[in-house]
Image: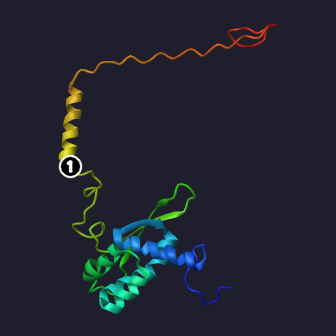
Amino acid sequence: MRHLRAGKTLGVKPAHRRARLRNLVTSLLEHGKIRTTVLRAKEMRTPLDQMITLGKQGDLSARRKALTFVKSKLAMANLFGELAERYKDRQGGYSRIMRMDRRRGDGAEMALVMLVGSETDPFIEGAKTKRAPGGRKPKGKVIDEVSEKVKGAEDAEITEVEKPKAKAPKAGKAKAGEDTQSGKAKK
């Protein structure tokens, strides 16, 4: 029985679970957003909040505690630099979990986990997104050049391309008593 045992096991042994959470948190601190399953995303919120709290403290003891969990120099630099500054007035809730479509192979629920207030966060003004408001593709120099080429191609005379002729099926050797056209036995 699992009386008073907090957290999900994630289907693996405790050492593997700790390593998985450590890798998820490190990747999120390095990249700002990651894609994982919903269950893993929910489980990684606790250690992520602990690491950002240590980053906000900023002293040597906090750095040493964080270094036992986060194993990347880039993640440590982000944690004690940019993220500590960004979340200095925030009391918790440093990550956002956005559900996505199901994974193709096994149908697991997927989620996009991102740090709140990052430049890729779609819920803040001035965020850098791939699409303009309303879901339109942004107009840029490259898109304008391509559209000009397409317009030029529409004006040009279109010539019909000759399609290759279908090859006839290979005729095999006819057995005695068979019709060579249909491959059926003669009566």
Residue in the foreground of this view, choosing between 110 and 172: 172
Residue in the foreground of this view, choosing between 117 and 57: 57
Q: Is residue 147 above or below residue 100?
A: above
Q: Answer with the quarter of the image where residue 185 lies.
A: top right
Q: Answer with the quarter of the image where residue 26 lies.
A: bottom left
Under mark 1, the amino acid is Lys
Residue in the foreground of this view, choosing between 70 and 99: 70
**Coloured how?**
rainbow
From the viewer's perspective, tell me whether residue 77 is left or right of residue 171. left
Quadrant where the N terminus lies?
bottom right
Quadrant where the C terminus lies?
top right
Give the residue at x 29% y 71%: 118
Give the residue at x 22% y 38%: 147
Look at the image and tell me whether residue 41 can be seen. Answer: yes
Q: Secondary structure at mark 1?
A: loop
- Number of numbered discs on residues: 1
Mark 1 neighbour class, 10 Å CA radius: few under 14, some 14 to 19, many 20 or more: few
Q: Is residue 58 above or below residue 110?
A: below
Look at the image and tell me whether residue 115 can be seen. Answer: no
From the viewer's perspective, tell me whether residue 115 is left or right of residue 105. left
Q: Is residue 113 above or below residue 103?
A: below
Give the residue at x 51% y 75%: 19
Instruction: State the image coordinates of residue 174 (x, y, percent, origin top left).
Output: 73, 10
Instruction: State the image coordinates of residue 78 (x, y, percent, origin top left).
Output: 30, 76
Instruction: State the image coordinates of residue 170 (x, y, percent, origin top left).
Output: 61, 15
The residue where tag 1 is placed is: 139
Q: Answer with the quarter of the image where residue 113 lies.
A: bottom left
